[in-house]
Amino acid sequence: MLADPSHILKTVYGYDAFRGLQEDIVDHVIGGNNAFVLMPTGGGKSLCYQIPAIARPGMGLVVSPLIALMADQVAALRQAGVRAAALNSDLAGEERESLWRAIHEGALDLLYVAPETLLRPEVLDRLSRVRLSLIAIDEAHCLSQWGHDFRPSYRQLDILVTRFPDTPRMALTATADAPTRAEILAHLRIDPDAAFIAGFDRPNIRYAIAEKDNPRAQLKRFLANHDGESGIVYCLSKRKTEETAQWLRSEGHDALPYHGGMDKAAREENQARFQHGEAVIMVATIAFGMGIDKPDVRFVAHFDLPSSIEAYYQETGRAGRDGLPAETLMLYGAEDVALRSRFIEESGAPEQRKMTERQKLDALLGLAEAASCRRQVLLSYFGDTCEPCGNCDTCAKPPKLFDGTIAAQKALSCIYRTGERFGQAYVADVLVGAGNQRVLDNGHDRLSTFGIGTEHDVRAWRAILRQLVAQRLIAVDLAGHGGLSISEAGRQFLREKPTLMLRVPAAPRAERTPASRK
Ligand code: ADP
Ligand code: ZN
């Protein structure tokens, strides 16, 4: 019988329907094509390779980084009647040989293997004599050198491209921003057209982001909507976590602190109270998160700027797991940005890594300063899309905009004139005509674009540049030194010059208090 995907879905997994893009992906891979799959955790990636592996002739090879994870998957598959096994280094000699016999006899649908094991020459040799239905590389972001989970052995998986050129390749991950995505596609030679990105939207979560004005008053207003509900307030430091919890208690809330400086017993007690409590506010550092499984978290507030869009997405994603409406608020101020920048500069990380971190911070600020729907900006960061959502602060109350057409033209031509290789700070300096040594050394004080932007200050220009990055008119060279260049959309903008509305930068000159003016 030719195995039909819906039939496998029903008989093996007991599900009636595919979710989201699963069916498209399964059909695409059964057709013998490569695929890149980006879906959030819990999105249902496993079926995307398991079903094609079962449906196609031959054995599916699954590269997975964690032996424990493999064991779970294999056990679940076997329970469902799928012939699955894991090849790992701690198999005893006899067991290993009987597994190899099964592999060669075509008695397996799926074989899980860690990259280190797979890359051993004798393993590759033996597999080259086996009919493979597909090769799925799970947690594919581990091959990105600039990611947080880099594993050198993952990097070498590109050998599969030459060793098994005719076997469909799949790369799957839950975390990949645009540059990481591009890196995975390029490294594993997967066509960008074969990228399936979906399921990042959490429609029941309302997003709001505001500049800190009077943060405690802002938080109080936010919490006033959530009487009797449980939620999380994220703070940057242990001290602030303690102080904020104490302040909230004095305001009559049942607020508990949670941070890495507390002893384990106290942390566990607070977590348990949050988990089972009715109206508990957990005031926490990012130490709180792993393993929270409370479906009715009704709100998440960031009292300080999170570290990246990924972190923001994950942390806000702890709200509304039950699918009922949930609300989020992120507060940020100039001092948060300065502090984050200092963390990065003083991290002792290699320059390349710092560069990536700076870009991530800029992307987050781009979201904070977004002139359009937050959800659209957030999803576009993950490669996903949506219509203006009507369920975020910018949809509800569009921010003050100005006609930024001229500003964008000036910024883009300045990037062009300086050779499309300098970062944000440098471009802003040239725009305002700041003749610092680097600018002078490069002779950029003689450019026609030097000082063409004195109507904004450096800070405002940096905010404008961030918005242009967020709108994808400017591309950032993440693998290099963060140099800005003009994207295809940016070139089109320069040719057609459509009106471009931008958000008024946080503290434009005209709106500063007289005291701060010179
Ligand atoms: P991921 O690997 O993306 O984190 P999983 O593949 O583990 O996600 O799937 C998450 C959960 O969703 C699993 O319990 C899985 O059985 C379930 N699931 C996946 N696809 C479907 C579907 N089409 N219908 C119902 N449940 C599904
Ligand atoms: Zn919106």
Image (cartoon, rainbow, N blue to C red):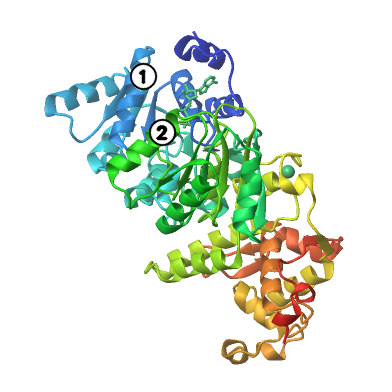
Residue beneath the point at 26% across and 33% down: 126
Task: Determine whether the residue tagged by mark 2 lies in a helix, strand or loop.
Answer: helix
Residue 84: x and y in percent read 33, 21
* Mark linked to residue 76: 1
User: Between 428 and 196, which is closer to the camera in this rendering?
Assistant: 428
**Within the image, what quadrant is residue 410 found in?**
bottom right
Residue 80: x and y in percent read 39, 13
Residue 100: x and y in percent read 23, 25
* Mark linked to residue 273: 2
> Seen in the image, is 257 located left or right of residue 389?
left
What is the spatial separation of the Cα atoms under label 2 and label 1, in whole angstroms? 32 Å
CB atoms of marks 2 and 1 within 8 Å: no
Task: Determine whether the residue tagged by mark 1 lies in a helix, strand or loop.
Answer: helix
User: Between 461 and 104, which is closer to the camera in this rendering?
Assistant: 461
Q: Is residue 203 above or below residue 474?
A: above
Q: Is residue 348 above or below residue 255?
A: below
Looking at the figure, which quarter contains the C terminus?
A: bottom right
User: Is residue 10 shown to the viewer in this render?
Assistant: yes
Would you call the spot at circle 1 few (<14 residues within 10 Å), some (14-19), or many (20 or more)?
some
Residue 256: x and y in percent read 44, 43
Residue beneath the point at 86% across and 61% down: 499
User: Tag 2: residue type?
Assistant: Arg
> Seen in the image, is 416 located left or right of residue 312?
right
User: Is residue 65 shown to the viewer in this render?
Assistant: no
User: Tag 1: residue type?
Assistant: Ala
User: Between 210 and 130, which is closer to the camera in this rendering?
Assistant: 210
> Seen in the image, is 110 located left or right of residue 430?
left
Would you call the spot at circle 2 few (<14 residues within 10 Å), some (14-19), or many (20 or more)?
some
Q: How many marks?
A: 2
- Mark 2, mark 1: which one is toward the viewer? 2
Q: Is residue 89 above or below residue 84?
A: below
Q: Earlier in the sequence, mark 2 or mark 1?
A: 1
